[in-house]
Amino acid sequence: MDNYKEVEGKRVHDHRFGKNTMSTLARCIWVPCPVIIGAGPSGLAVAACLKERGIPSLILEKANCIASLWKLNTYDRLRLHLPKQFCELPFMPFPENFPTYPTKTQFVAYLELYKNSFGLVPVFNKTVVSAEFDDQCGFWRIKTLGLKQEETEYVSQWLIVATGENADEVVPRIDGMDDFGGPILHTSSYKSGLLFLGKDVLVVGCENSGMEVSLDLCNSNARPSLVVRDSVHVLPQEMLGKSTFGLSMWLLKWFPVRLVDRFLLLVSRFMLGDTEKFGLHRPEFGPLELKNRSGKTPVLDVGTLAKIKSGNIKVCLGIKRITHRAVEFVDGKKENFDAIILATGYKSNVPQWLKEADMFSEEDGMPKEAFPRGWKGERGLYAVGFTKRGLLGASFDAKKIAEDIERQWKAEATNFMPYIHPLTSS
C-alpha cells in the first residue's frame, strides 16, 4: 500500500507528525485527504462534492454496506415522505421513471448508483471507537476496530462527521418492561405487519414512523393502538395538488412563517377535519415555527388518520406502567397486548466516540451552532447531516464543506502525497 505512510506493529516517526511524535499501534495509516465517518446519504454527498472539486476522501463505515439505516433498519413499506426533487443528493437527480415518492428499495438503488457514478469506495466494517485531535502533531487521530477486533488508526488533517442524527435507537425505559412477557421491539427491527396478523399491538410514538407502522399493522389485519403522549401536527401529504412541503417552501419565499402556518392549518382542517376529536392535539406553535424552534417534524398523513377516524387504530394516552401482556395508561385504563413496538426515534452517537467538546453538544450529540452554521468546527472538523432538515440540509452542508476544504487543499497542495484508495492499491 504505497499511498500511505503505514506500519504494522512498529514505532513510527514521520515528519508530518512533528519530530518528537511517535505512535505504537498494530496499524497506523496517514491519510492525506479528508476522512469521512459514515457512508450514509450525508457521507456520500460530501464525498461526491469533494470529488467534483478534485479532492479524494476516505469513507469509514461500521456496517458492511452503504446507507445501513435504510438497508437494514427500516420497514418494508417505507417511502420517502417528501417528493424526490427535495431528496436528491448534489449533482445527480433521481431517475425520471421513479415515482414522486420513491420506495425504500428505489432510494437505496439511487444511493448505490450515486456511489458508483462518483467512484466512491467506502471502507466497510470499520467501527470508529475514538477520534481526537492531537495537539502535538496537529492532526486528527481516528481509531477503529474491524470485524476481528483488529485496531487501525487513521491520521488526517480533516475529519468529517457524517454519522447523522439517527445513529442509535432511542429505547425508553418504561416501568414494568421486563415483566411484559411478549416481544418489545424498536421500529429499527420492524419489517412488516404480516408478522403480527391477528395480534393486538401497541405502537409507542406518534411521529411519522409510528403513524406509518400503525397503518401497516392495520392493513395487515393486526389490531394496532397508538400511544400519543405529546401534541402533534398532522398535515395532509399533499395540498391543492402539490406536496405540502413544496407548497410550504414556495409560500415562505413570499410570506412570514406564522402566516404560512395559518394557511397550512386552515387547509389541513378543511381536508382532515378537527384532529383534536381523535386525541391528536395540536401544539401551541404552528408546524413550521415548531420545526424551526425544536426540530420536530409534522406528520405527513399517508392514510393513518382515516384508520383512526374509523376506529381501526385506537389512540391511547401515555403509559403509566407495563404488566404481563398488558399496559396501564395514565388515564387509568388497562388493556391487553401481544406485542409492543417502540417508534421512539433515534439519536446522534457522536459524544460516544468524538473526543471534542467545542463543536458538538454532550447532551444530544448535535452541533451547538444552529443551521446554517453548524457544519464547521475548529481545526479541520466538520459535520454533515445534522441540520434537522433532512437530505436538503445534508446537501447544503456537503457543498459548504467541500468549498471550505478546497481552499485549504489548493493552498497546501504541494504538501500532499499522491492518493490511491486503500481498496484499489496493491
Image: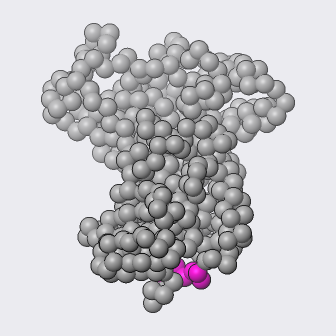
Q: Is residue 231 visible?
A: yes
In this orientation, which residue lies closer to the viewer: 162 or 250? Answer: 162
Is 22 drawn above or below residue 361 in the view shown? Answer: below
Q: Quadrant of residue 222?
A: top left
Q: Say whether residue 310 is visible.
A: no
Task: Report the residue at 37% width, 42% height from top.
Answer: 169
- Look at the image and tell me in which quarter the C terminus lies: bottom left
Q: Position of residue 207 (x, y in %)?
A: 48, 31
Q: Is residue 179 left or right of residue 60?
A: left
Residue at the image position 29 percent from the left and 33 percent from the top = 340
In the depicted structure, whether residue 246 falls above or below residue 376? above
Q: Which residue sits furthest bottom?
A: 426
Colour pattern of the rendering: one colour
Q: Is residue 68 left or right of residue 404?
A: left
Extreme residue in the right direction = 254
Q: Main secondary structure of the magenta part?
A: loop
Closer to the camera, 257 or 159? Answer: 159
Q: Is residue 153 left or right of residue 109?
A: left
The spot of residue 20 in percent (x, y) is 43, 71
Q: In front here: 360 or 207?
A: 360
Task: From this view, report whether residue 221 is shown above or below residue 66.
Answer: above
Is residue 402 inside the magenta stretch? Answer: no
The residue shown at (42%, 50%) is 355
Q: Position of residue 405 (x, y in %)?
A: 66, 62
**Magenta residues, start to end:** 417-424
The N terminus: image quadrant = bottom left
